[in-house]
Image: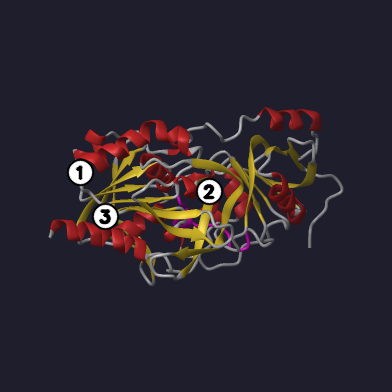
Amino acid sequence: MTFTPDRPTACLALADGTLFYGIGFGATGQTVAELCFNTAMTGYQEIMTDPSYAGQVVTFTFPHIGNVGVNPDDDETAEPVAAGMVVKWMPTDPSNWRSVQGLDTWLAARGRIAIGGVDTRRLTRAIRQSGAPHVALAHDPEGDFDTDALIAAAREFVGLEGLDLARDVTCAQSYRWNEMRWAWPDGHQPQTDPQHKVVAIDYGAKRNILRCLASAGCDVTVLPATASYDDIMAHDPDGVFLSNGPGDPAATGVYAVPMIRDIMDKTDLPMFGICLGHQMLALALGARTVKMNHGHHGANHPVKDHDTGKVEITSMNHGFAVDGQSLPNGVVETHTSLFDGSNCGIRLDGRPVYSVQHHPEASPGPQDSFYLFERFAKAMADRRV
């Protein structure tokens, strides 16, 4: 049931003046961001630590958030990146053999604000109908809120359009990655027999993407988002990977697109992109990207693979999309969403260059899309023949 106190200790203010009151948990203070909703039933820790959620507060439509606690293995990056969270029911004491800490304590230690006791069904309907709003989220144990100031702060938020957030979440310097996917009973094990040298461009890379590359036989070197063609080629790679990330792809594309075009024009290297990396590749090939009304965020999105006719259950997290109508000649649309028909994958005809909008590493299917990593590995192997 929804817990309602005598006096609310958190307030969510929308830019249109709508107010939602509830119980605060996690850190105290105030934050401003874009509000989105996520329909996943599991994975709240992975969502909060996914760099693609930079600049966003996440509303969870599933009510039981926090019930399995948190643990270091499930972090997608070192610290939470999402600005805050909104839930219906207050988190209960965690019950899971992998749990090492409660969600409330974890959020508080990492400076992330959360609000519980909210009618998330009503809030989600508002997002779907009117688009992702700008919001201010405040947590005050005394329940002292200046609602006019909160609404004003929400209205002053600049929004995500035009923002290059990849620079904020990318790595500061290059590093090697060799940890593979989690497997029973030994957990994450190191890659000991890599077959392919891959340079991964970090626009906000999730750790499990890097693990999937390692599990597919890749020796991975991660470079910052601003890496140049010369930076990449200095590593003599067998392939180039373009990671997920936050913000407006057109803004990140200012420096990313010229590098990608240089790779395609000057080499025959296989290239694979996910999420923002997909959008970067599309821009480099001459397509456009557009801001979506409320985006795709969840772990139950059906995507059709047009090459095989199969439908994959996928994880999604994006507020911008590639305009499928803008794809130029020679660029093939390989995947589309069965929810709204939006573009979810492309490939360059006759070249081992391709990308997808969804997240094959997140395993909602659970392994419907892992073949994409294997396809990348095969393309690198074929190139050496």
**Residue at 24%, 62% in the rendered image:** 378
**Residue at 48%, 65% in the rendered image:** 304
Report how far apart the C-alphas of labels 2 and 1 lie in the structure: 30 Å
Residue 383 in the image: above or below residue 294 = below
Q: From the image, state whether disc 2 or disc 3 is nearer to you.
A: 3
Q: Is residue 224 left or right of residue 58?
A: left
Q: Amino acid at mark 1?
A: Thr
Please state the horizontal and vertical placement of residue 128, each as a whole percent of the image.
Answer: 69, 50
Element under disc 1:
loop
Residue on which disc 1 sits:
267
Residue 364 in the image: above or below residue 267 = below
Element under disc 2:
strand
Magenta includes 166?
A: no
Residue 156 in the image: above or below residue 337 = above
Q: Amino acid at mark 2?
A: His
Assign the magenta stretch its main secondary structure.
loop
Quadrant occupied by the C terminus = bottom left
- Mark 1 is surrounded, within 10 Å at the Cα level, by few (under 14), some (14 to 19) or many (20 or more) other residues, namely few
Q: Amino acid at mark 3?
A: Gly
**What mark, if any, has residue 350 been given in the picture?**
3
Q: From the image, state whether disc 2 or disc 1 is nearer to you.
A: 1
Q: Are marks 2 and 3 in contact (CB under 8 Å)?
A: no
Q: Is residue 180 left or right of residue 127?
A: left
- Mark 2 is surrounded, within 10 Å at the Cα level, by few (under 14), some (14 to 19) or many (20 or more) other residues, namely many
Residue on which disc 2 sits:
318
- The magenta segment: 66-76
Please state the horizontal and vertical placement of residue 141, each as a whole percent of the image.
Answer: 75, 40
Q: Is residue 207 left or right of residue 32?
A: left
